[in-house]
Amino acid sequence: MHELDHYIYPHRVLHWLVAGAVLLALAIGLTLGFLGYERTVEIVGNTVTNLLYTSHKTLGVLILMLMTLRIITRLAFVVPDHEPPLNTFERVVSTSVHHLLYLALIIMPLLGWAATASGGFPVEFFHWHLPAIIDEREQLSEQLFMWHERLGWTILGLIVLHVAGAMFHWKIKRDNVMKRMSLFD
């Protein structure tokens, strides 16, 4: 495989770091959303519940930073051609899913940050408290959290489409699509 067959290595590393962070953030977020604060405390205790909330917020900020770096590497370096080329349907679906994932993974952490701040809760990145990007307004917070949750489900759907497309290319078409993002040459 020659160099133009795949993305530059930093972009591939960022892809897999974002994937891991998003899956973990979704797992924690959906669990907390399903159980709610009180039920989570009842099941795992206050310390673990607070750790889950802090971890979810930390992952959100990390995803925002990693996605910013992904966009920079995507714009700064050559995107490898598909070999063999994708047909029109595959190209439209692939481009749409990728663009929607990029957009959603930028909007999602910003929605979470705004929802958390407007709810009067600390926005945490590990042990640091980040500044609120919006004033405390409880009704707005409820609306923002609702959209944050809906976007979470949307991202999950986009991930399913993304993984299904990758599996289709890997197992059925057996083309080089998977090699483009592989960490291993």
Image: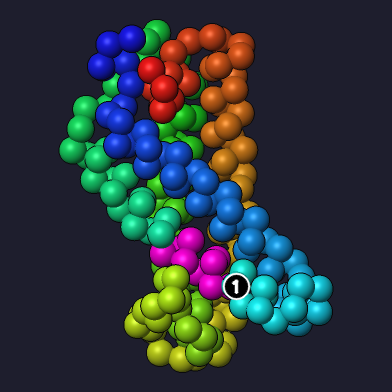
Q: Where does the image place residue 7, in percent across and percent down from the top left?
A: 31, 27
Q: Where does the image place residue 136, in percent across and percent down from the top left?
A: 46, 91
Number of marks in the rendered image: 1
Residue at 36%, 51% in the rendered image? 67
Residue at 48%, 10% in the rendered image? 175
Give the residue at the far left of this rendering. Answer: 76
| Mark 1 nearby-residue class (10 Å; few <14, some 14–19, many ≥20) | few
User: How is the rendered protein coloured?
Assistant: rainbow
Asked if residue 140 can be seen in this view, the reply is: no
* Picture quarter with the C terminus: top left
Give the magenta range: 53-61
Residue at 40%, 81% in the rendered image? 129
Look at label 1 and name its amino acid: Leu
Q: Where does the image place residue 51, in percent across and percent down from the top left?
A: 60, 72
**Horizontal side of residue 42 vs 118, given as left or right:** right
State the residue in front, 174 or 148: 174
Q: Majority secondary structure of the magenta segment?
A: helix
**Horizontal side of residue 79 vs 58, given as left or right:** left
Q: Is residue 43 above or below residue 167?
A: below
Q: Is residue 127 magenta?
A: no
State the residue in front, 87 or 164: 164
Q: Is residue 60 magenta?
A: yes
Label 1: state its secondary structure: helix
- Disc 1 target residue: 51
Q: Where does the image place residue 103, in percent across and percent down from the top left?
A: 40, 51
Asked if residue 102 can be seen in this view, the reply is: yes
Image-quadrant location for residue 77: top left
Image-quadrant location for residue 31: bottom right
**Horizontal side of residue 25 vs 132, given as left or right:** right
* Picture quarter with the N terminus: top left
